[in-house]
Image: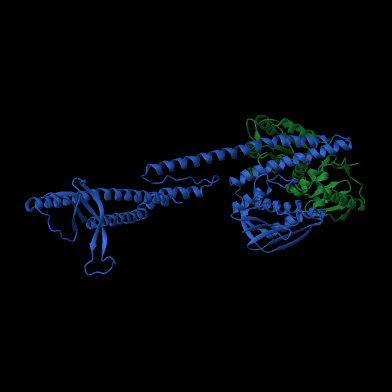
């Protein structure tokens, strides 16, 4: 997939670029309003990560220009402004999602994957990962055509891992993904461990390989091997 | 003490002192004049005696009148010094038998003089009663007291009628000040008054209020800007950490350090978000008000927290009635989530949490440390119990949200339970 990162903060831009660059992905970047405008008018992307505050202009105007020309690119706004009005404005104009800084790269990846999935599978709600088939609408998981019962959180976690396959996902990122910001009391993440244990157990009992591994006590990683 | 009362008291004391002094001066002056008058009478009497003696060459007959006594006594020649003196005048009783002595003493004025009749030398003693003088003085005293009382009465009436009205602008300014809230937009109005002092006070107060509001606004803008500026570096740290853990092969020590970094960054982030949120609530910048079914919201939240309840082996009792409120969904969620996560965080393993909701109130009780928290202090910014991992802003935010919605948020420690109640 092809992704455009419009972000003026160099450190953040580089990190995102590095995280998204992998086999089959092409990442391009723009660090100001002008280069962003010229890029979106010249090329098409599967998803555009759009910062609102840009040197030389406003990200919302980039989005407007995109929509005026009826370009189908998916747009995810990343903004430091956690204001409801901004969020509503962005989504009204036609952004697909809105993520507030600071965020975990794994969260960003999961959101981008969701946008691309919605854009490209046009109506199909099935996500396939090796022998695992996930029905996104019915929230059902099948392994080799047999259904495996997942709780809501386990389902969300599995999707999160698949979107971030091959990456170490930190426990903090998992906790924030599942519980939002309310999770600030949890310095011990035992309940994450038990969720993951359950997912692995259910998948392996259904005949899957053991995809999810602990990574140095910092997080977990789903690998394709 | 009210200014009016103080003013009256000072007024009263001054009036009395002045009246007393004037009274004394009156007394002295009138007494002096009347004594002079008496002395003239005495001299006239003396002269009459001298004239009589010159004419008749013997002493006149002494008789007693109502207010005059004259006595003659032989004396050694040249031994009598002529002088006026104050003495007592014995008034004989006529018909009245009040006194044992058959009369009563009045104050009197006397003159000692001498006369030579032939070769005999006599001492003359003339005494006149001063009772009329005293009556006069008594009258003056009564009039003085009367004037004092009359003045007091007038003073009271004036105070009631005029001073209260006069001070009205002052009381108006006071009530404006009492209503003054640094966070809202209401300004102190200019009062219509013709009194310079009050005009000045009004202007000063209005200026001060405007300045305080302006400074407070500046401070809020600063907080907001500072928090916003912090977001980007936090985002960079976060993303760099996420990138760092993708590089393989960490030792146990390194991964422990990384975990600590993650924890610290997420705390920093939460703190920052809380500050931003506070500014937003205080500025009333959240406008997404809607009908919210609180029961549903609480149920949803409780199921969100399920793992955490289980992890701490907390026993949860939930009694929910129906309650709808009209509020920002975002804020209502933050409010409930703050209170519930507090109840979890400050609990011990195996403790209890009771949540109840009815039409009038929402109550959350939790076990925890067996000592009550410092009542109002817990709602102040950055107040937190030792070892707390929170930002210290959770309850401040909760209280702000409640105030914003016009609800009360109270804390109570009862029967081993820390209880927070929202009164709708």
Answer with left or right where residue A188 lies relative to residue B209.
right
Comparing A33 with B177, the one in front is B177
- Which percent across, then down, holds residue B267? 74, 42
Q: Is residue B336 above or below residue B245?
A: below
Quarter holding the N terminus of chain A? top right
- Which percent across, then down, holds residue B129? 22, 57
Residue A82 in view in this figure: no
Residue at 82%, 53% in the rendered image: B311
Answer with left or right where residue A209 lies relative to residue A10.
right
Q: How many numbered marks, from 0 up?
A: 0
Residue at 70%, 33% in the rendered image: A7
Q: Colour of chain A?
A: green
Visual colour scheme: by chain
Residue B246 in view in this figure: yes
Quarter holding the C terminus of chain A? top right
- Which percent across, then down, holds residue B328? 63, 52
- Which percent across, then down, holds residue A92? 64, 45
Answer with left or right where residue A99 lies relative to residue B86.
right
Comparing B156 with B191, the one in front is B156
Comparing A148 with A44, the one in front is A148
Q: Quadrant of residue A71?
A: top right
Comparing A172 with B7, the one in front is B7
Q: Colour of chain B?
A: blue
């Amino acid at each position: 997939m092809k992704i455009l990162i419009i972000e003026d903060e160099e450190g953040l831009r580089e990190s995102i670029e590095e995280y998204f660059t992998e086999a089959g992905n092409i990442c391009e970047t723009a660090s100001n309003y002008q280069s962003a405008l010229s890029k979106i008018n010249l090329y098409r992307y599967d998803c555009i990560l759009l910062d609102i505050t840009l040197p030389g202009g406003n990200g919302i105007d980039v989005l407007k220009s995109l929509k005026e020309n009826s370009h189908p690119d998916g747009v995810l706004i990343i903004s430091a402004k956690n204001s409801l009005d901004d969020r509503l404005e962005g989504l009204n104009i036609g952004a697909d999602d809105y993520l507030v800084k600071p965020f975990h790269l794994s969260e960003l990846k999961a959101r981008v994957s969701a946008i691309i999935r919605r854009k490209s599978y046009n109506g199909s709600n099935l996500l396939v990962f090796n022998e695992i088939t996930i029905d996104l609408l019915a929230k059902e998981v099948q392994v080799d055509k047999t259904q495996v019962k997942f709780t809501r959180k386990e389902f969300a976690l599995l999707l999160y891992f698949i979107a971030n396959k091959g990456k170490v996902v930190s426990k903090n990122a998992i906790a924030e993904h599942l519980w939002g910001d309310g999770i600030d009391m949890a310095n011990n993440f035992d309940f994450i461990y038990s969720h993951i244990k359950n997912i692995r157990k259910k998948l392996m009992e259904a005949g899957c390989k053991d995809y999810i591994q602990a990574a140095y006590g910092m997080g977990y990683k789903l690998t394709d091997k | 003490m009210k200014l009016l009362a103080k003013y009256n008291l000072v007024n009263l004391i001054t009036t009395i002192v002045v009246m007393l002094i004037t009274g004394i001066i009156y007394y002295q002056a009138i007494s002096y004049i009347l004594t002079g008058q008496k002395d003239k009478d005495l001299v006239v009497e003396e002269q009459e005696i001298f004239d009589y003696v010159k004419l008749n060459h013997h002493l006149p007959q002494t008789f007693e009148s109502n207010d005059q006594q004259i006595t003659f006594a032989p004396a050694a020649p040249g031994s009598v010094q002529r002088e006026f003196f104050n003495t007592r005048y014995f008034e004989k009783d006529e018909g009245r038998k009040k006194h044992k002595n058959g009369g009563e003493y009045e104050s009197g004025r006397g003159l000692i003089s001498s006369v030579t009749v032939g070769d005999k030398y006599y001492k003359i003693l003339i005494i006149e009663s001063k009772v009329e003088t005293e009556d006069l003085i008594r009258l003056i005293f009564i009039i003085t007291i009367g004037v004092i009382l009359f003045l007091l009465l007038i003073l009271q009436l004036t105070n009631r009628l005029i001073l209260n009205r006069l001070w009205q602008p002052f009381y108006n300014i006071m009530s404006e000040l009492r209503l003054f809230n640094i966070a809202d937009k209401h300004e102190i109005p200019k009062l219509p008054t013709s009194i310079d002092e009050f005009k000045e006070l009004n202007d000063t107060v209005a200026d001060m209020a405007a300045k305080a509001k302006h400074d407070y606004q500046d401070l809020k803008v600063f907080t907001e800007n500072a928090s916003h500026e912090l977001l980007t570096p936090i985002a960079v740290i976060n993303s760099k950490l996420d990138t760092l853990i993708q590089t393989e092969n960490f030792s146990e020590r390194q991964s422990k350090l990384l975990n600590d970094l993650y924890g610290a960054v997420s705390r920093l982030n939460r703190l920052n978000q809380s500050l931003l949120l506070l500014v937003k609530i205080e500025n009333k910048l959240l406008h997404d008000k809607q009908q919210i079914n609180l029961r549903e919201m609480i149920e949803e939240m409780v199921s969100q927290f399920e793992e955490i309840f289980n992890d701490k082996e907390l026993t949860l009792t939930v009694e929910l009635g129906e309650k709808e409120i009209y509020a920002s969904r975002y804020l209502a969620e933050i409010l409930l989530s703050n209170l519930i996560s507090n109840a979890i965080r400050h609990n011990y393993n195996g403790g209890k949490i009771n949540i109840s909701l009815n039409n009038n109130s929402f109550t959350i009780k939790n076990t925890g440390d067996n000592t009550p928290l410092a009542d109002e202090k817990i709602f102040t910014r950055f107040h937190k119990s030792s070892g707390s991992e929170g930002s210290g802003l959770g309850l401040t935010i909760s209280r702000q949200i409640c105030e914003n919605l016009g609800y009360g948020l109270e804390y109570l420690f009862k029967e081993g339970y820390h209880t927070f109640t929202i009164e709708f």
